[in-house]
Amino acid sequence: VLEEAAAEDPSARNRKALGISQFFRGRDTEAAILLTGVHEEKPDDGEVLYYLAASLMRAGRIPEGQQYLRDALDLNPADPSALRLLGLTLADQPGEELEAIELLTRARRAGAYVPELPCILGSLEMRLGHDESAWTAFSECLEDHPDHPEANLGLGILSDRRGQKGHAIIQYEKYLRIADAIDDAIQGGELAPDTKLPPMRNLAYDLGVTLGTVSRAYQEAERRGLVGGEVGRGTYIKG
């Protein structure tokens, strides 16, 4: 339908709609050609700049795409999509860590969702040698992603630098001891079927461990068939 509309009326509006549609269909070359033409007519259209940049970068033309994202940010410095995409692409480039951190932080403030952002920031801070900032970011990462390999490795390296050799391994194994304790309590009759376990945040506080450790322990207990979880019901002992 969009192709017919653009053929009958090749206005910038119709070609823009078709170009964005081609992007979402994975036709990056076609999208880039259409959106380049629209950009020449409407250089101040930030949405065109974003999808043109995204099409080019997905086609492997990273520097060109990054320049169009910079142009979009010149028009709107708070554009969350442009901040996120430019930050993520710079995060993969050695020497661009500081700008990547700045852009991704601005993207979060602007309301953009950046998957695993603390994990990414931890890696960037570590590459810069900012150990304390990296520790904070990796710790936040593990609260939501307790199995994240880079965060666990990063904390292990940082622990060694702090003179806490083996600390990360001990922390990483704590979840197994918690899962074992749940198993023992069930076998000993202390936890009956349908007993609700404490909220993860409460148990983490009581045990003096991270929220990520308790989350991983509950996941391990569920993997063993000891507990189940339902939205609104929490985690409970299986019958």
Image: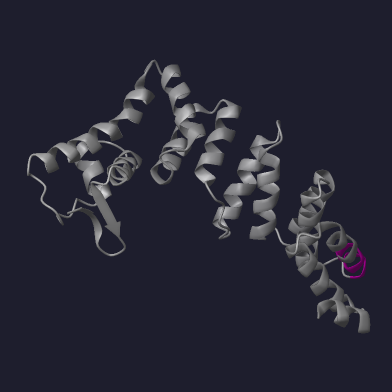
Quadrant location, the C terminus: bottom left
Number of numbered markers: 0
Q: Give percent across and percent down for residue 111.
A: 56, 60
User: Image point 24% across, 50% down: which residue?
Assistant: 227
User: Which range is magenta?
Assistant: 35-41
Residue 63, by quadrant, is top right
Pick the front one: 171 or 30: 30
**In-image side of 158 versus 171 (left or right):** right
Q: Give percent across and percent down for residue 190.
A: 7, 44
The answer to whether one can see residue 78 in this image is no
User: Image point 56% across, 34% down: which residue?
Assistant: 123
Residue 32 in the magenta stretch? The answer is no
Residue 226 vertical placement versus 152 (above, below): below
Q: Give percent across and percent down for residue 175.
A: 29, 35
Name of the residue lying farthest toward the left: 189
User: Image point 52% across, 46% down: which residue?
Assistant: 116
The answer to whether one can see residue 117 in this image is yes
Magenta segment's dominant SS is helix
**In-image side of 171 versus 53 (left or right):** left
Residue 95 vertical placement versus 198 (above, below): above
**In-image side of 170 versus 136 (left or right):** left
Residue 76 vertical placement versus 191 (above, below): below
Q: Give percent across and percent down for residue 44.
A: 83, 67
Pick the front one: 21 or 238: 238
